[in-house]
């Protein structure tokens, strides 16, 4: 049976490297050995110890711990990126799960023999992205062979670093798509109905429009009225927070509320049906924005949004590598 390659994160590199172990925290859980060897049992125990944890957090964390205790085998490989020295540490598992004892830091452990410590720059961007997982413990799949190649006798960090990195484009795309998914998920989770209307009004304000949110419970079908300046045209905005695609009849109801000279804007976190798209194409005075287009606007005007929305969707501006033959366009 082929050996697995595991990735692990730990803030205390000394415990890992000087202690010749791979270690996880969750000290409050104590010894994990008595827990029945099922994922459900680990979830139940996790929920008991951390009653305020969300359902998603319980499933994710309990799953990591279950794998650490029951799926890691002697002879498996371990990849540990240490931030302090920017090294990739590669080792093999030499022992079954053991508990370091109450009061110990990072008490969930396996004995490990560290085989090699390789500079991060020796690996492709894709490999580094994979071991940069948000999880504390995970299976390395896509770039496992690349990490293990560093153990070969003829491996040269210098020659490896000098090669063109073909994974850069895919990695950049993964980062961008993950960010876009995160934004839409946070909007869908936190902003329903009137709350989404207030957010869209704030986004339009950031774009330079003057907006008025309609009173709740009105029957006009118009959620926001916007002007670019003191003069017409008036822009009537309808916002839908549901998951279903918008139909042609829904957009026609917006058209029915418009007077001559008005423009319409329809905003949804989802998308539009084929017929609705055709209707929008044939009705240029109404613009339809779907979830993907909404994310584009959020990213463009993010820094001008109200602080409460920036806290809701916490983003940090960073530079990411792109292929050298690709020019970024604005």
Image (cartoon, rainbow, N blue to C red):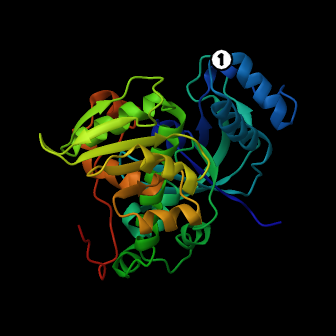
Image location of residue 224, percent across then percent down: 35, 36
Q: Is residue 45 left or right of residue 8?
A: right
For label 1, the SS is: loop
Which quarter shows the N terminus?
A: bottom right
- Residue 229 quadrant: top left
The x and y percentages for residue 254 are 44, 46
Left or right: 136 in relation to 224: right
Number of labels in the image equals 1
Q: Quadrant of residue 68?
A: top right
Task: Please report the residue visible at 55 percent of the width from the left and 25 percent of the height from the top.
Answer: 105
Residue 50 x, y percent position in the rendering: 65, 19
Identity of the residue drawn at 36% across and 46% down: 258
- Among the 4 quarters of the image, the one containing residue 280: bottom left
Label 1 packing within 10 angstroms: few (<14), some (14-19), many (20+): few
| Residue wearing tag 1 | 102
> Which of the image's four quarters has the C terminus?
bottom left
Against 292, residue 65 (above or below) is: above
């Amino acid at each position: 049976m082929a050996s697995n390659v595991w990735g692990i994160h730990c803030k205390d590199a000394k415990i890992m490297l000087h202690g010749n172990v791979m270690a996880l925290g969750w000290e409050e859980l104590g010894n994990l050995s008595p827990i029945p060897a099922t994922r459900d049992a680990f979830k139940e125990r996790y929920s008991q110890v951390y009653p305020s944890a969300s359902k998603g957090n319980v499933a994710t964390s309990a799953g990591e711990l279950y794998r650490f205790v029951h799926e890691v085998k002697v002879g498996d490989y371990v990849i540990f990126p240490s931030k302090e020295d920017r090294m990739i540490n590669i080792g093999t598992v030499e022992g079954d799960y053991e508990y370091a004892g109450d009061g110990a830091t990072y008490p969930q452990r396996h004995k490990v023999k560290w085989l090699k410590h390789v500079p991060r720059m020796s690996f492709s961007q894709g490999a580094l992205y994979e071991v940069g997982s948000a999880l504390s413990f995970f299976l390395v799949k896509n770039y496992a062979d690349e990490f293990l190649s560093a153990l070969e006798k003829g491996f040269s960090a210098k020659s490896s670093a000098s090669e063109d990195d073909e994974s850069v484009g895919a990695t950049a795309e993964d980062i961008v798509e993950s960010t876009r998914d995160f934004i839409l998920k946070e909007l869908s989770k936190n902003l329903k109905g009137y709350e989404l209307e207030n957010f869209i009004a704030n986004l339009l304000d950031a774009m330079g429009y003057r907006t008025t949110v309609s009173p709740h419970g009105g029957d006009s079908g118009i959620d926001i009225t916007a002007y670019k300046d003191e003069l017409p045209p008036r822009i009537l905005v309808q916002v839908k927070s549901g998951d279903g695609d918008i139909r042609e009849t829904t957009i026609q109801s917006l058209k029915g509320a418009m007077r001559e000279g008005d423009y319409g804007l329809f905003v949804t976190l989802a998308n539009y049906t084929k017929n609705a798209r055709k209707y929008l194409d044939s009705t240029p005075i109404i613009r339809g924005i779907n979830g993907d287009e909404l994310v584009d606007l959020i990213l463009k005007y993010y820094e001008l949004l109200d602080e409460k929305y920036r806290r809701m969707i916490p983003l940090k501006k960073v530079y990411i590598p792109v292929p050298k033959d690709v020019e970024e366009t604005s």
